[in-house]
Amino acid sequence: MFDNEQYKKHKIFDELLVYKEFYKDLSFGVFSYISIGTKAIFYIDTYIYSSIEGTFDSIYQLLSLGRINDAYALLRKLYDAIIVNIYCDLYLEDKFGIDNIIVDKINNWFIGNKKLPEYAKMNRYIKSHKKLEPLNKIIDFDGRYKKIRENCNNHVHYNSFEIMLSNDNEVINKNRIKLLDQLSSDVLNVVILHIACIILIDQHYIMASDYIDSLELGMTPEEGSQYLVAPYVQNMLNVTIKKYRKDIEKVIKENTDMEIE
């Protein structure tokens, strides 16, 4: 492991563990939902979230070895996974219906027959979608998030010699902590984007188990229990959106029925 104490104690390591655990819980939380629009037996989002959990673990392991350049390459992968997830959920919601039980574009991707549209096309679909309109007004895809993509691409394509050196533990580089600071910020903002979209598209994903537990026990659920937020989701909101993006928190509260604290 990279032996610089300041490096090893950087906040990003604790953050990555929090994100990893959140996606693990989210994957389990949506597992029982019925898959729509594809021939999947189980709900596909549960596997997307599980994959994202694994990517956070990989980023953690790479950073533990001092591989900042490789970690940024995985952030690019993570960003792509999140855009795919948001796009698929929106497209399925738009196209699924009694007369269109199998949504070919998503199902063909699921069974491996065809690729999804290129990133730019999926991004445009997300940016122009009515359901995300309140969020899109403040999320700044063309500023903040474009810059994150540029940061990722710089590391993927070795757009400077210094970037290449960020993967080498033997090189003394005073900017390594600065790079970790930037990576921490970029990861946070990607996670914030994903959580906000999940809640606005599928607010039931963040529901506490009280309502379903009552139904499974043959009991009448308590009035309003379908709007209670799972504790692990609320904890994640507390350390991300509530702490860093009050404007997004306001949008979520105004456009969902969930009882977010």
Image: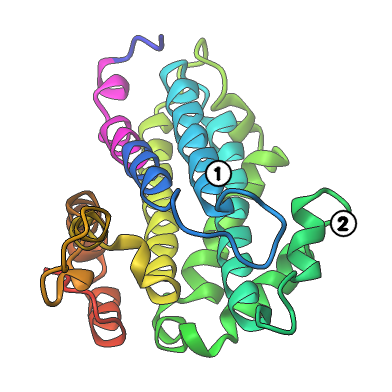
Q: Residue furthest front?
A: 218
Measuring 57% from the left and 85% from the top, which residue is drawn there? 129
Secondary structure, mark 2, is loop
Q: Is residue 184 left or right of residue 233?
A: right
Measuring 59% from the left and 35% from the top, which residue is drawn there? 163
In the displayed structure, 9 sits above or below 25; it is above
Position of the N terminus by quadrant: top left
Q: Which residue is mark 1?
A: 47
Q: Which residue is mark 2?
A: 114
Q: Taken as a whole, is the magenta stretch helix, strand or loop?
A: helix
| Residue 8 lies within the magenta run | yes
Q: Position of residue 53 (x, y in %)?
A: 45, 38
Measuring 50% from the left and 48% from the top, which residue is drawn there? 46
Q: Which residues are magenta?
A: 5-19
Q: Position of residue 78 (x, y in %)?
A: 56, 46
**Amino acid beneath label 2:** Lys
Q: Residues within 10 Å of mark 2 (few under 14, many from 20)?
A: few
